[in-house]
Image (tube, rainbow, N blue to C red):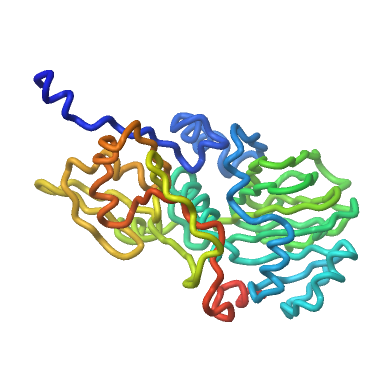
Amino acid sequence: MTAPAARRRAPAPQVTSALATWFGGPQAIAAFRERKLGRAPLVLRPRDSAWRSVAPDFDTVIAMAAGGVPFQIAAERRYDRTGDPHHLRRALAEGGTVFLPQVHQVLPRLMRLIVALRAGLLGPRKEECSFLFAVEGRGRTGMGLHHDGPVDAFWLQLEGRRTVTIGEPVAPGTPEDLPARAAGRGTWRTLALGPGTLFHLPPWTPHDVVCHGRSLALSLTWTTAPVRGDRARAAALAAWDIASGSVDRIPAVSRRRFWTQVPAIAGPRRRRTFRLTTPDGVVDLPLAARGIAERLAMMPRFEVPNARGASALAWFLEHGLVAPQDLPLRIIPSNPARLDGWRFS
């Protein structure tokens, strides 16, 4: 390549994965996937403050529930599944747990984190769920000693602090709710979960949670059953489950930063093109775009040194896969009654 040709080439953008807050790079992600995933509970400390923008604050979450987003209340193993907003304040005052199932449908930045965990660690699974827990903690156990069955879970602590006491995995088929006396058998340990920590809980692991003061936390779960077939796997990896509606606030436009707007999965090479699977279908792109396309599954942010550097993203800007704006924090659903959380029982 001649020197003038080298000067004409646009500088490559800097790429920051949606998992960079907890993992130092692809090697760290691969090491966790091979050695820890599904095998050992682990608390990952935050490396930066990006986790703060994943979800709204405590008061906004309660306002979301009062405004029609699905929620349930748990107190001493009794459940209020009515979704009646008049029950919220009393439940919180008494130390009950308010939780919003499938809350990712109205939180695009949480959906981005789910996609990155799916693409980087878990692969396509047959079912994935999200729960947002809000508690005015009283130092008592939250939902009692239990396990979540055949699921891999990741918890993100957003506000306040919790402790989780975990035991050795139970046998498949064990009832989910466990008697308190079970904590007297086997080996148990208690872990502290502070703001920004990402905690991995393997399948069939019994646990009990205590909230110390106000706590806001996410629980993300995936079944252990994988999706089979190349096309089905690509579609599952590119799934983007966001409700229709308006946004709470339009993010600012940046000159140097670009955010992935939806996941995209690069397919096999063809003669001069390759196929990119997106939530809206398949797009054919030139092979020159494949290097960046292979990064989109992790929902990264791109930084370019100057306006010319953005030319490397031109194909993806044209198709709406990348934009100079972050995802909105919150969706105000046009039809809250159709949100999936109402179907949880």
Horizontal and vertical percent position of residue 324:
38, 48
Q: For residue 321, which quarter of the picture?
A: bottom left
Q: Position of residue 317 (x, y in %)?
A: 29, 51
Q: Is residue 291 left or right of residue 108?
A: left
Q: Is residue 198 left or right of residue 269?
A: right
Locate residue 192, reporting x and y percent.
77, 39
Q: Residue at x 79, y 72 (%)?
A: 79
Nearer to me, 50 or 204 = 50
* Camera sees residue 196: yes
User: In this view of the protein, can residue 187 be seen by the observer?
Assistant: no
Residue drawn at x 51%, y 40% is 19
Total tally of numbered discs in the picture: 0
Residue 308 figure quarter: top left
Q: Between 84 and 304, which is closer to the camera in this rendering?
A: 304
Which residue is situated farthest in the top direction here?
3
Q: 273 and 1: which one is in front?
A: 1
In the rendered view, tell whether residue 199 sits above or below residue 319. above
Determine the image quadrant of residue 12.
top left
Which quadrant does the N terminus fall into?
Answer: top left
Quadrant housing the C terminus:
bottom right
Q: Is residue 107 left or right of residue 72?
A: left
User: Is residue 301 shown left or right of residue 11?
Assistant: right
Q: What x and y, as percent, mark residue 47?
A: 60, 32
Q: Residue at x 38, y 33 (%)?
A: 14
Residue in the picture at 84% in, 69% down: 91
